[in-house]
Image (tube, rainbow, N blue to C red):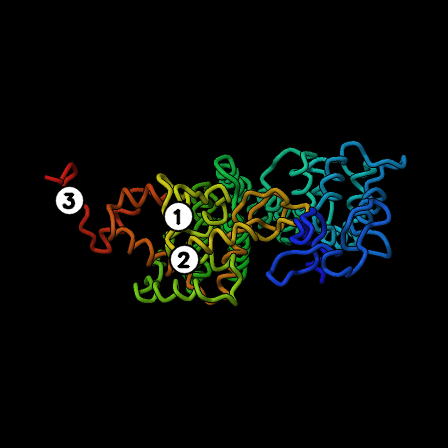
Amino acid sequence: MTRALETYGTCTGCGVERLTPGLAADGGLLCTDCAGGIGDFFCEQCGQEGRRYRRGVCGRCVLTGRLRDLLDDGTGSVRAELLPLFDALRQMRRPWGGLTWTKQPYTQRNLRALARGEVPLTHEGLSQLTPWRSVAYLRDLLVQSGVLPPADRQLLLFQRWLAEKLPTVGDTEHRRLLELFAAWHVQRRLNTLADRRPLTGKQIQQARREIHLATAFLAHLAERGRTLADCTQADVDAWYAGGYTARRLTHAFLRWAMRSKHMPKVAVPHRSTSNPAPLAQHQRLALLRQLVNRDDVPLQDRVAAVLVLLYAQPLTRIARLTADDVQRENGEVLVRLGDPPSPVPAPFAGMLLDYLGQRPNTMTATNPDARWLFPGRRAGQPMTPEALQLRLRHLGFPTQRGRAAAIRHLVLQAPAPVIARMLGYDDDTTTRLAEEAGGTWRHYAPGDHSR
């Protein structure tokens, strides 16, 4: 019933555009009158039809009243700079999410602090507020509504995490070294990456891991009675003997420390961490059949998995696709991954078109007009690659092995440069994969072979 009271459209009975909670025998939607008078859902305040939050009043009106109170600048009016945020929140198509969010004590505290000028209405001012997850959500809303200028949210989150992490290091010398490493290596690299494109959660996760491992390595030296300045090869070897794969990201700290003369020269061990073997072709095809036929699996998960298996797309790139990347030309469905767009075979073409009409996270204030193929829960943001990976992992889907199988199959079907352009890969990558897979396209001479 809840979903029915949030469904609007043209009534198949009377042809009027209004709330359509009823269902006709042929599957069409019916208004309350044509459905047999199932109730009166007109709001006593705004006169619009909708689900009521309390007796006689719809959720949107209740949310509007609550926002007026929370964003009051102390004069009885919403703070002028926050009016775009006020309008975006009260106009969401499904106000229940906004009511739940604004009911939280920390949300109310933060909104009132901004409205009354207790903290500056800037990115730096937001960094003073807590908890950080709620503040990150609020920051995205403020950027999307134009109250704040765009900023790399992942970089801001890392800077906030770092400011909280470093003071917890008890040893003064260790903290000094970590501050230098963070400033001159980790943040410098992140700033360079952020200048090219928005940072990903995986890049921030790696940066945090580098700080964690650098902290742990310094503690390891202290346990052995040494400092970084008198570190020996035996100390480094003992550290990696405790688990090379888990500690591999210590490489960055050690190399920075040697370059900056904070420690003597040592050999940093290296071991191969090559990717697992790809799926066999029959396993890949069996997975594709399952994804097409399994109606018990959410459609968004099936679409993401098929993009991996058919087009060898990494989740980082899938997360950045938009609805505009799905094209229809002359009765054919195409997906724009490179140049030219790639054809979408049936029955996946039907799945993809169905999914476009029911993308998640588009009914709240965060992404009402989102063009992302996989809209996220944060304002203006797509679903993160990490969130997609977690969803596919719950299905038991072998993302890495499936992508490896797909690209190796594709480079056997056409010349590597053609595949690279169509799928957005680097030419060198596809050429190397084609050679590993035993492809023979590179032996063909270019030119017209029709004669």
Task: Indicate the position of residue 413 as horizontal and vertical percent values.
Answer: 25, 52
User: What amino acid is found at the position of numbered circle 2 in the picture?
Assistant: Pro
Circle 1 SS class:
loop
Residue bearing the label numbered 1: 265
Q: CA distance from mark 1 to mark 3?
A: 49 Å
Q: Residue at x 68, y 45 (%)?
A: 365
Quarter of image, res 124? top right
Judged by depth in the image, the label closer to the viewer, 1 or 3, is: 3
Q: Which mark is residue 347?
A: 2
> Tags 3 and 2 in contact by the CB under 8 Å rule?
no
Q: Is residue 370 left or right of residue 246?
A: right
Callout 3: few (<14), some (14-19), or many (20+) C-alpha neighbours within 10 Å?
few
Circle 2 SS class:
loop
Q: Foreground residue, 99 or 243?
A: 99
Task: Indicate the position of residue 330 as horizontal and vertical percent values.
Answer: 39, 42
Does label 2 or label 1 sit earlier along the sequence?
A: 1
Task: Indicate the position of residue 122 as horizontal and vertical percent values.
Answer: 70, 35
Q: Foreground residue, 271 or 438?
A: 438
Q: CA distance from mark 2 to mark 1?
A: 59 Å
Q: Which mark is residue 444?
A: 3
Q: Residue at x 58, y 42 (%)?
A: 155
Which residue reaches farthest left?
451
Circle 3 SS class:
loop
